[in-house]
Image: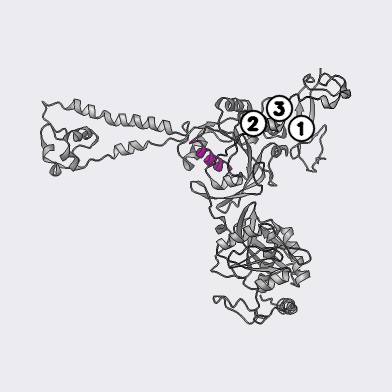
């Protein structure tokens, strides 16, 4: 009888080992191996064996290959053509990231830092789709009451008692008023509405003459009269309206279904029974398969649960949105196979101290990758941002040294971003290089090019570079903008705020071409920019911009940072210390020597002055 055995599985890569190691031999991660007991089981007779020939054609490989017939496979031409209509999520920004909308039957994995807004986004998307489709929200982290409290703050009209608003007809009945002229024109209409009015609402002095008659129910009647039956009959009108209001509301209620459950088998039974158009699994690390002995969130549990959900989703054509936890390094927690199983991988990121959030596509089988959608966190949830460039550019009315403007492309979306640089004397022997939103290794490379090819002495200076709004700009097209900002801070000069700078910096000091230049320039022209410094050799169409082509970094510096301290801007005062080049002078030798002279005058003294 086979015995139970123990194996060790890496939480990072999913590799299995018969013994424990302090460092995973597969991914070199320390302390990632966890023990797992494999239950005893007999060999599976249904699994085909390479040594047997029960599943092979008789004769082995001696048969003629031209006589082969397909057993289960088929040709692409045999598949019936069917147009798949994407469904809108209710947010244009999310539809952009998904490639144009939600594809039926697809699996979408969303990861992000805790508290960034993953559950909020999916709850709002589910509420939008619940107006026309059946939606199942599986909550493994929150109870039904907790989801209801969160939904009451964000949305309205969720089914299953998650939200329940007072029917609008109730307020109309309670506030129903009747004009005095209607009483004068129609006595019968007055009698039908009199029960809904307070006792003598007009006051004794404003009561019309016909209301003062003895048969008026609003006037105090003698004891022998009994208008009680008529009053009781009229009092049934509000209850009938209430019943009609409830019936109308039940017909318009969204089909939003909530399932607070972590058992995978129960979730699969609910999916097969309800057959929703879209299901949200929040989150996959809390779901467990009872047949496995490992804890929820382990490599085996995440792999098996995702595989089972994928099979049901593909078979029943159910769209699945799966929430995934992230590790401290920022990656999706669990095995790497999780990202391979799903169709789309999205990351919800952003600075928790800022209000905007970025939804970034890392993998998409139905659209472009590295596409982003911009949202803003407000009091009642997430709101999409129509023009994200306004978040990442500063005020062009206020001039400050060390700033430049670039146009970054995230997927197919151009975003205008302002870069800021600060160069200051190093307080210690080794200068600091700190970045926010810019790759630090890329900055070190740009600083080396500026010192070697341009002659800017930066080896003894601290350099800080950041992007406005904290947007992560990683593409090489931002290199030239970083270089211009650093030089402008070193020279204490102001770059024209109506100029955009686009280009990649090579190690030889040259400016390399970039992709999607026309798309970037269109975005800059739409926002009112007047000049653009672009790499030489790219000829964009006329978009109303003054396009300046440069082939070297030094040429771009001369064009972006003119000699006098930007005397074209009347608002900016000039000083003789910072104005060393004459107007119109662009001699390269004088420009390079200017850096050396300023560095000797300012930084060799006991009190450095910028």
Q: Residue at x 20, y 29 (%)?
A: 231
Q: Inspect the magenta stretch and tell me whether residue 85 lies in it.
A: no
Real-space Cα distance between discs 1 and 3? 11 Å
The residue carrying mark 3 is 293
Q: Residue at x 67, y 31 (%)?
A: 79
Real-space Cα distance between discs 3 and 2? 43 Å
Question: In the rendered image of this protein, does residue 445 appear above or below residue 337?
Answer: below
Give whichever of 103, 273 is nearer the camera.
Answer: 103
* Residue 14 relative to residue 494: left or right: right
Give whichever of 519, 350 is nearer the camera.
Answer: 519
Q: Residue at x 68, y 46 (%)?
A: 330
Q: Which is nearer the N-term, disc 1 or disc 3? A: 1
Q: Inspect the magenta stretch and tell me whether residue 125 lies in it.
A: yes
The residue carrying mark 2 is 80
Q: In the picture, residue 406 is in which quadrant?
A: bottom right
Boundaries of the magenta span: 116-131
């Amino acid at each position: 009888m086979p015995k139970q055995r123990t194996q060790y599985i890496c939480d990072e890569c999913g590799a299995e080992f018969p013994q424990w190691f302090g460092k995973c031999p597969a991914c070199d991660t320390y302390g990632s191996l966890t023990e797992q007991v494999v239950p005893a089981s007999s060999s599976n007779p249904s699994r085909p064996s390479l040594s047997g020939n029960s599943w092979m054609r008789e004769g082995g490989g001696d048969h003629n290959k031209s006589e082969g017939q397909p057993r289960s496979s088929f040709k692409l031409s045999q598949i019936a053509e069917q147009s798949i209509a994407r469904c809108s999520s209710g947010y244009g920004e999310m539809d952009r990231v998904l490639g144009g909308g939600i594809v039926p039957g697809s699996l979408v994995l969303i990861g992000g830092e805790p508290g960034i807004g993953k559950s909020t986004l999916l709850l709002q998307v589910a509420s939008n789709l619940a107006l026309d489709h059946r939606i199942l929200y599986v909550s493994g982290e929150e109870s039904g009451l907790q989801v209801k409290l969160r939904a009451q703050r964000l949305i309205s009209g969720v089914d299953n008692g998650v939200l329940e608003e007072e029917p609008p007809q109730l307020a109309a009945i309670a506030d129903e008023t009747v004009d005095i002229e209607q009483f004068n024109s129609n006595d019968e209409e007055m009698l039908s509405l009199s029960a809904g009015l307070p006792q003598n609402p007009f006051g004794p002095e404003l009561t019309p003459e016909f209301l003062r008659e003895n048969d008026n129910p609003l006037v105090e009647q003698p004891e022998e009269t009994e208008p009680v039956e008529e009053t009781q009959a009229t009092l049934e009108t509000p209850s009938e309206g209430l019943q009609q209001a409830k019936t109308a509301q039940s017909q318009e209620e969204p089909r939003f279904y909530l399932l607070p459950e972590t058992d995978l088998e129960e979730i699969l039974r609910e999916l097969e029974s309800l057959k929703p158009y879209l299901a949200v699994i929040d989150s996959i690390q809390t779901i467990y398969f009872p047949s496995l002995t490992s804890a929820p969130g382990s490599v085996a549990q995440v792999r098996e649960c995702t595989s089972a959900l994928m099979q049901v989703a593909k078979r029943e054509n159910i769209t699945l949105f799966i929430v995934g936890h992230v590790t401290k390094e920022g990656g999706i927690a669990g095995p790497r196979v999780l990202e391979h199983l799903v169709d789309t991988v999205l990351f919800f990121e952003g600075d928790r101290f800022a209000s905007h959030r970025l939804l970034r596509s890392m993998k998409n089988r139905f659209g472009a990758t590295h596409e982003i959608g911009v949202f803003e966190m407000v009091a009642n949830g997430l709101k999409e941002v129509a023009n994200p460039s306004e978040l990442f550019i500063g005020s062009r009315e206020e001039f400050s040294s060390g700033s430049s403007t670039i146009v970054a492309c995230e997927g197919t979306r151009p975003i205008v971003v302002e870069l800021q640089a600060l160069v200051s004397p190093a307080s210690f022997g080794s200068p600091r290089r700190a970045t926010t939103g810019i790759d630090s290794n890329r900055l070190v490379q740009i600083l080396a090019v500026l010192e070697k090819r341009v002659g800017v002495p930066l080896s003894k200076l601290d350099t800080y570079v950041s992007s406005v709004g904290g947007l992560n700009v990683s593409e090489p097209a931002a290199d030239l903008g970083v270089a211009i900002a650093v030089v402008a801070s070193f020279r204490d000069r102001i770059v024209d705020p109506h100029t955009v700078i686009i280009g990649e910096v090579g190690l030889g000091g040259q400016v390399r071409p970039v992709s999607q230049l026309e798309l970037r320039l269109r975005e800059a022209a739409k926002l009112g920019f007047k000049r653009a410094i672009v790499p030489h050799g790219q000829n964009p169409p006329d978009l109303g911009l003054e396009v300046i082509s440069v082939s070297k970094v030094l040429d771009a510096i001369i064009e972006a940072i003119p000699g006098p301290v930007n005397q074209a801007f009347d608002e900016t005062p000039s000083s003789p210390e910072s104005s060393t080049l004459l107007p119109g002078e662009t001699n390269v030798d004088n420009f390079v020597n200017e850096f050396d002279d300023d560095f000797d005058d300012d930084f060799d003294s006991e009190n450095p002055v910028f």
